[in-house]
């Protein structure tokens, strides 16, 4: 069963490479995937939300969600599972970006993207939150398009990211007084 899932993971990446990749989309997905490098977009968005008093609690929720994602995905699970990147295993797979050096499972890009975006989606007006959620999805899918993660890496990163978003929200609601600010 596990072997079949691993084969499916690799076959999906080859299918994306053969049938979806093209010179028009390549630059777009390279830029989108770069937005998730080290969680930079999410960190910057969080910092901007921390400045106005009106969005400070939402910014703190995102900050704690990102911290949980860093601890769970990048420090604990990546090193515990130690999954080799797909371009070393899947014959014929060619990554479109510089090969990341850390382990593959789970996707840190998907983890941080969903951690922050889900916290923002739940706590900002939906007309803003939906854009963050859409970006999280695009960043996560970009990891498949550029060939540096298996689909199961991205799925696991998204799931752990969603969990981290709830943990970040819980920390702020439980331990940080509201001080008259609104959650959005």
Image: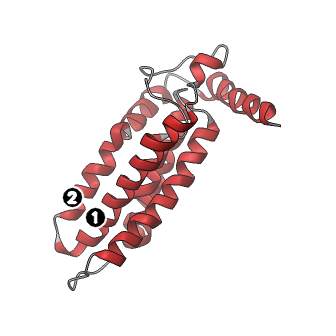
Residue labelled with disc 1: 59
Location of residue 143 in the rendering, given as x and y in whole percent from the top left corner? 51, 34
In the rendered image, the quadrant that contains the C terminus is: bottom left
The CA span between labels 2 and 1 is 8 Å
Residue placed furthest toward the right: 1
The residue at the point 61 percent across, 33 percent down is 150
Location of residue 96 in the rendering, given as x and y in whole percent from the top left corner? 48, 21
Quarter occupied by residue 39:
top left
Q: Secondary structure at mark 2?
A: helix
Q: Which mark is residue 21?
A: none
Q: Is residue 41 left or right of residue 162?
A: left
Q: Is residue 77 left or right of residue 41?
A: right
Please say if 92 is above or below 137: above
Tag 2: Cα neighbours inside 10 Å, few (<14), some, or many (≥20)? few
Is residue 109 among what the camera can see?
no
Q: Which mark is residue 48?
A: 2
| For the residues bearing labels 2 and 1, Cβ distance under 8 angstroms | yes
Location of residue 77 in the rendering, given as x and y in whole percent from the top left corner? 52, 42
In the rendered image, the quadrant that contains the N terminus is: top right
């Amino acid at each position: 069963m596990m072997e079949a899932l691993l084969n499916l993971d690799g076959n999906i990446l080859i299918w994306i490479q053969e049938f979806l990749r093209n010179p028009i989309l390549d630059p777009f997905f390279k830029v989108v995937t770069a937005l998730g490098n080290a969680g930079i977009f999410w960190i910057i968005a969080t910092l901007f939300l921390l400045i106005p008093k009106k969005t400070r609690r939402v910014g703190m929720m995102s900050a704690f969600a990102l911290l949980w994602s860093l601890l769970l995905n990048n420090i604990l699970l990546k090193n515990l599972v130690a999954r080799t990147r797909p371009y070393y295993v899947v014959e014929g797979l060619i990554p479109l970006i510089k090969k990341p050096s850390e382990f593959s499972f789970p996707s840190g890009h998907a983890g941080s993207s969903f951690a922050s975006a889900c916290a923002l989606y739940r706590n900002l007006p939906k007309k803003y939150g939906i854009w963050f959620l859409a970006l999280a999805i695009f960043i996560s899918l970009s990891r498949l398009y550029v060939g540096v993660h298996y689909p199961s890496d991205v799925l696991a990163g998204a799931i752990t990211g969603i969990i981290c978003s709830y943990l970040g929200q819980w920390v702020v609601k439980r331990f940080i007084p509201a001080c008259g600010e609104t959650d959005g």
